[in-house]
Amino acid sequence: MKDLLKDLNKAFENKVRLGIMSALMVNEYVDFNTLKDLLGASDGNLASHLKSLEKSEYITFEKEFIDRKPNTKYMATKAGKSAFVKHVKAIEQLIK
């Protein structure tokens, strides 16, 4: 049992961060407002979780302007995708 727990990643224990990574695993990128709507998170709450994943180097972002409005797109990094897959596999092993 202890061996199964070692692959769980604290970065993904929060439901918002789990949701962010889940969305980024199946999309090339997702913008801030889409993530906010999808997860039902406030601006501040979402921003703090994105920053946490950014610090872990699990996500990256690009800022651009669309019709003079700022738009931030988030993408999962290679390291983030690998860590998330490992985390999900650990959960699957726990369920078995």
Image (tube, rainbow, N blue to C red):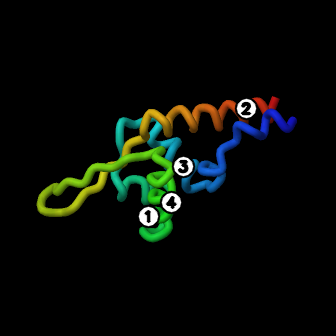
Dot 4 lies on which element?
helix
User: Could you say which is closer to the camera, residue 29 or residue 39?
Assistant: 29
Is mark 3 in CB contact (under 8 Å) with mark 1? Answer: no
| Residue pointed to by mark 1 | 47
Q: Which residue position holds label 3?
A: 19
* Residues at discs 2 and 3 in contact (Cβ within 8 Å): no
Identify which amino acid the numbered label 4 is placed on: His
The tag earlier along the polypeptide, 2 or 3, is 3
Residue at image point 77% right, 30% down: 93
Q: Which of disc 3 and disc 4 is earlier in sequence?
A: 3
Type of amino acid at the residue the image marks with label 2: Glu
Q: CA distance from mark 3 to mark 1?
A: 13 Å
Mark 3, secondary structure of its residue: helix
Q: Residue at horizontal 35%, vertical 42%?
A: 29
Looking at the image, tell me whether mark 1 or mark 2 is earlier in sequence order.
1
The Cα–Cα distance between marks 4 and 2, rounded to whole angstroms, is 24 Å
Horizontal side of residue 71 vs 6, given as left or right: left
Mark 1 Cα-neighbour bin, 10 Å: few <14, some 14–19, many ≥20: some
User: Gap in Å between the C-alphas at discs 2 and 3?
Assistant: 17 Å
Q: Residues within 10 Å of mark 3 (few under 14, many from 20)?
A: some
Instruction: Determine which of the numbered discs, if any, sits on residue 6 in the image.
Output: none
CB atoms at circles 4 and 1 under 8 Å apart? yes
In space, the residues marked 4 and 3 are separated at their CA atoms by: 10 Å
